[in-house]
Image (spheres, rainbow, N blue to C red):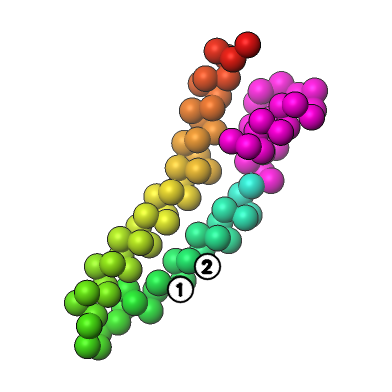
Amino acid sequence: MTRIRDLETQADLDAPEVLRRACAQRVRPVLMTALVASLGFLPMAVATGSGAEVQQPLATVVIGGLVTSTLLTLFVLPCVDSLFHARRP
C-alpha cells in the first residue's frame, strides 16, 4: 500500500498503471521474504525425531500463514485497492 501511495504522489499515472508498477516492484521482496521463512521452517515440518509431534503442526501453520499472507499481499490487496481507488478524492 505504501508503494502505491508513493507512486500516486510521484508520478502522473492512471490507477491501473500505478498498481502494475507497485506490484512489479514489490513482488521480489515479498516472495523472497516468504520463501526464506518457509524454507527455514521446512525441516521442522518434516521432522520425525523426538518432539516432532509438537514441531510439525507449528511449522505447518507458520508455512501456511506465510503462503496465505503472500498471496493476499500480491493478489488480493491490489484488487481491493483498485476497487476503492475510484472512491478517493
Q: Which residues are magenta?
A: 1-25
Q: Secondary structure at mark 1?
A: helix
Type of amino acid at the residue the image marks with label 2: Val
Quadrant showing the N terminus: top right
Would you say the magenta stretch is mainly helix, strand or loop?
helix
> x, y (%) of residue 54?
22, 74
Q: Dot 2 surroundings within 10 Å: few (below 14), some, or many (20 or more)?
A: few
Residue 72 lies, with reference to residue 39, above or below; the image says: above
Tell me if label 2 and label 1 are in contact, CB under 8 Å. yes
Residue 20 in view: no
Residue found farthest to the bottom: 49
Residue found farthest to the left: 53
Type of amino acid at the residue the image marks with label 1: Gly
Residue at 46% over, 71% down? 39
> Can residue 16 be found in the magenta stretch?
yes
> x, y (%) of residue 70?
47, 50
> Can residue 45 be found in the magenta stretch?
no
Residue at 47% over, 36% down? 76
Residue at 45% over, 42% down? 72
> x, y (%) of residue 51?
22, 83
Q: Which mark is residue 88?
A: none
**Residue that label 2 marks:** 36
Q: Which mark is residue 40?
A: 1
Residue 52 lies, with reference to residue 10, above or below; the image says: below
Quadrant showing the C terminus: top right
